[in-house]
């Protein structure tokens, strides 16, 4: 159910890509988007008492711009930067309402997605009067396809897995002269993914503003690690990397960060195949080379968990103890609540808790990065009890 490893490569070295200064600039861009409002940071005092920690704070990203996931923070910032670059102006001068009138015709932004990133890019393109083309891997839920098409984008479902879909989107963009807005990097393609990861820092900057106490423990889920790296990089700069502990969690079927963190020399290790996990947003087999160094240098432990762990997390968040607030958390959002629960009740989990010094004085920060983006499966898990942990 749960495998973990202490990060033996930890140095605490901060990254110049994710500073407090950059996060301020990113946030001032997001504040200009109509409807911007910080998502709730929900405290769960009854659960904290039950699990033996001082406090549990959950950032509920189901409220992000009405899109049910945090991802738009990255896509919108990247589109803003690309448009600013195209018009040779500073990002601070971008006016989202009038930007399209400054172009002869709309630009075409393409991307590959497991669902949430493409939704964010489609939405941001529509907000800025531009065009989006979105590629999805085989087996993608119809609900995601419909959501993306509903935002005015073209959406194409491929017959290959996520990583191959990224390659396809990249090749097609090159051929057609489109701008690829991808949330992972590779050699020669780094600028846009850097902006995307920087875009995610808004989520953490809001959380620090909303919390009464700085976190002692931060739990971050990873697909390619662009979100975890951006957030951890920013928090390390803002709080000092020595002042908190971080656990990076992943689905067992796509645990490329865990494998990289447990490799001999801390090199990036990929996982291929079908990457079969209900955590669609985390089912990515190739680490992002831009953010891997941040995770390698600043996180304290890597965890690889089965789907039942996130299913438990989703049920805990959706069915709180008396007095606590309910949070609708999807498959990629619930993993860390499930893991925190395992850290309180499961022998292997307790070892992880000990490794990262989790105790009664700990203030835990968790990001529920999506709501019920796959509503049918959400109800299958939370209402009908699919994927019980006892079966593991
Ligand atoms: C809901 C959700 N959470 C977390 C992630 C992980 O982000 P990353 O691929 O940057 O690690 C994703 C990625 O799509 C996601 O959709």
Image (tube, rainbow, N blue to C red):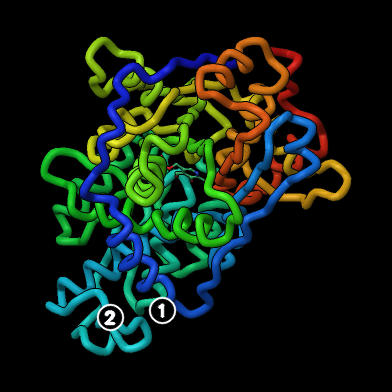
Where does residue 267 sit, x and y in percent of width and height? 23, 20
| Callout 1 crowding tier (Cα within 10 Å): few <14, some 14–19, many ≥20 | some
Left or right position of 135 against 204 = left
Q: CA distance from mark 1 to mark 2?
A: 9 Å
Left or right position of 5 against 382 = left
Where does residue 98 sit, x and y in percent of width and height? 32, 88
Above or below 73: residue 54: above
Q: Please tell me which of labels 1 and 2 falls first in the chain.
A: 1
Left or right position of 83 against 244 = left
Q: Are marks 1 and 2 in contact (CB under 8 Å)?
A: yes
Residue located at (28% from left, 60% from top):
22
Kindly indicate the quadrant of the structure image that contains residue 233: top left
Q: Element type at marker 2?
A: loop
Who is closer to the viewer here, 356 or 74? 356
Who is closer to the viewer here, 67 or 42? 42
Q: Element type at marker 1?
A: loop
Where does residue 49 sit, x and y in percent of width and height? 77, 35
The residue beneath circle 1 is: 32
Name the image quarter holding the N terminus: top right
The residue beneath circle 2 is: 94
Residue located at (34% from left, 20% from top):
261
């Amino acid at each position: 159910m749960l495998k973990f490893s202490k990060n033996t490569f930890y140095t605490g070295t901060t990254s110049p890509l994710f500073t407090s200064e950059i996060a301020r600039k990113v946030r001032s861009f997001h504040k200009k988007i109509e409807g911007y409002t910080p998502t709730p940071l929900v405290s769960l005092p009854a659960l904290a008492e039950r699990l033996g920690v001082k406090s549990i704070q959950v950032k509920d990203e189901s409220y992000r711009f009405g899109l049910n996931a945090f991802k738009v923070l990255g896509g919108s910032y990247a589109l803003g930067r690309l448009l600013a670059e195209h018009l040779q102006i500073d990002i601070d001068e971008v006016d989202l309402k009038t930007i399209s009138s400054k172009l002869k015709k709309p630009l075409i932004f393409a991307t590959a997605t497991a669902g949430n990133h493409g939704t964010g890019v489609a939405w941001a393109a529509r907000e800025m009067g531009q065009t989006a083309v979105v590629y999805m891997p085989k087996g993608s839920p119809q609900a995601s396809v419909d959501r993306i098409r509903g935002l005015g984008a073209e959406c194409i479902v491929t017959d290959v897995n996520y990583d191959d879909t990224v390659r396809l989107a990249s090749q097609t963009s090159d051929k057609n002269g489109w701008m690829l807005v991808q949330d992972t990097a590779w050699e020669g393609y780094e600028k846009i993914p850097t902006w995307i990861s920087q875009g995610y820092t808004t989520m953490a900057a809001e959380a620090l503003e909303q919390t009464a106490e700085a976190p002692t423990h931060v739990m971050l889920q990873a697909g390619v690690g662009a979100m975890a790296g951006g957030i951890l990089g920013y928090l390390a700069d803002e709080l000092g990397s020595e002042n908190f502990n971080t656990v990076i969690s992943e689905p067992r079927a796509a645990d490329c960060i865990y494998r990289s963190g447990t490799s001999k020399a801390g090199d990036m290790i990929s996982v291929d195949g079908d990457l079969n996990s209900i955590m669609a947003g985390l089912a990515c087999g190739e680490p992002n080379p831009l953010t891997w160094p941040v995770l390698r240098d600043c996180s304290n432990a890597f965890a690889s968990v089965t789907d039942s762990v996130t299913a438990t997390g989703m049920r805990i968040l959706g069915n709180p103890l008396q007095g606590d607030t309910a949070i609708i958390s999807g498959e990629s959002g619930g993993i860390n609540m499930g893991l925190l629960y395992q850290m309180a009740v499961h022998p292997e989990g307790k070892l992880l808790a000990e490794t990262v010094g989790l105790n009664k004085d700990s203030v835990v920060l968790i990001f529920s990065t999506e709501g019920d983006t796959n509503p049918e499966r959400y109800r299958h898990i939370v209402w009908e009890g699919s994927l019980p942990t006892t079966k593991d």
